[in-house]
């Protein structure tokens, strides 16, 4: 096994952070299943890099942020990357991601970290509140990658 890396998954409450992790790692998220609020959890996965080396990835599933709460300080130490999650049916959750990106930029101690942004629930087109072009423009200006996803697909 090669090196291990720490990835913090964060965003507003109820945007689907845990559902994304469970679908990605185990393929077992059931749409419509009862939602249980996460306090904090760690998921461990193994990936093969383009050089054929297996690396362990520890995903830190953080508690959903509410009412201006900041990311806990321990989320900034020794972190190799962040996955910022918003829901495409919530403009407020996208604004929270914008604030999280600023918070990370201030706290990352000049260390180069990878930041990926996921717009979850893209299958709910009728409820969409975040314009995909606006989100992509923001991502480009912040130099982060953004994808819209759905755990239902």
Image: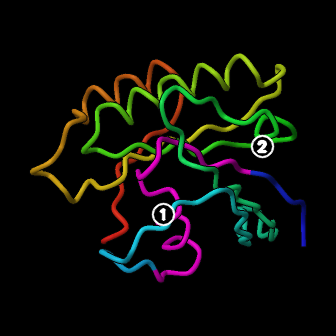
Q: In the image shown, does 50 or 22 lie closer to the viewer?
A: 22
- Report how far apart the C-alphas of labels 1 and 2 lie in the structure: 19 Å
Which residue is rendered at x = 70% and y = 68% of the image?
43
Q: Examine the structure image and report whether residue 66 is included in the region drawn in magenta.
A: no
Residue 51 at x, y = what percent? 77, 63
Mark 2, other Cα within 10 Å: few <14 / some 14–19 / many ≥20: some
Q: Earlier in the sequence, mark 1 or mark 2?
A: 1
The answer to whether 64 is drawn above or below residue 151 in the figure is: above
Q: Are marks 1 and 2 in contact (CB under 8 Å)?
A: no
The answer to whether 8 is drawn above or below residue 77 in the figure is: below
Residue 129 at x, y = what percent? 20, 37
- The residue furthest left is 126
Q: Examine the structure image and report whether residue 9 is included in the region drawn in magenta.
A: yes
Which residue is rendered at x = 70% and y = 43% of the image?
81
Mark 1, other Cα within 10 Å: few <14 / some 14–19 / many ≥20: many
Which residue is rendered at x = 58% and y = 44% of the image?
10
Q: In which quadrant is the C terminus drawn? A: bottom left
* Residue at image mark 2: 80
Secondary structure at numbered mark 1: helix
Q: In the image shown, does 145 or 82 lie closer to the viewer?
A: 82
Task: Specify the segment rendered in magenta.
Answer: 7-28
Which residue is rendered at x = 64% and y = 56% of the image?
39
Secondary structure at numbered mark 2: loop
Q: Tell me where residue 102 sits by quadrant.
A: top right
- The mark found on residue 125 in the picture is none
Q: In which quadrant is the N terminus drawn? A: bottom right
Q: Nearer the viewer, mark 1 or mark 2?
A: 1
Q: In the image shown, does 45 or 30 lie closer to the viewer?
A: 30
* Residue at image mark 1: 20
């Amino acid at each position: 096994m090669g090196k291990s890396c720490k990835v913090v998954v964060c965003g507003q409450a109820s945007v689907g952070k845990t559902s994304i992790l469970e679908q990605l790692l185990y393929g077992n998220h059931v749409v419509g299943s009862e939602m249980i609020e996460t306090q904090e959890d760690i998921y461990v996965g193994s990936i093969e890099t383009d050089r054929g080396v297996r690396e362990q990835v520890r995903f830190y599933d953080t508690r959903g942020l509410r009412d201006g709460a900041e990311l806990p300080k321990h989320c900034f130490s020794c972190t190799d990357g962040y996955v910022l999650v918003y829901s495409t049916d919530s403009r407020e959750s996208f604004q929270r991601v914008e604030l999280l990106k600023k918070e990370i930029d201030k706290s990352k101690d000049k260390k180069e970290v990878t930041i990926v942004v996921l717009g979850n629930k893209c299958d709910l087109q009728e409820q969409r509140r975040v314009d995909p072009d606006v989100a992509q423009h923001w991502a480009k200006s912040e130099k982060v990658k953004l994808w819209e996803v759905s755990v239902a697909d």
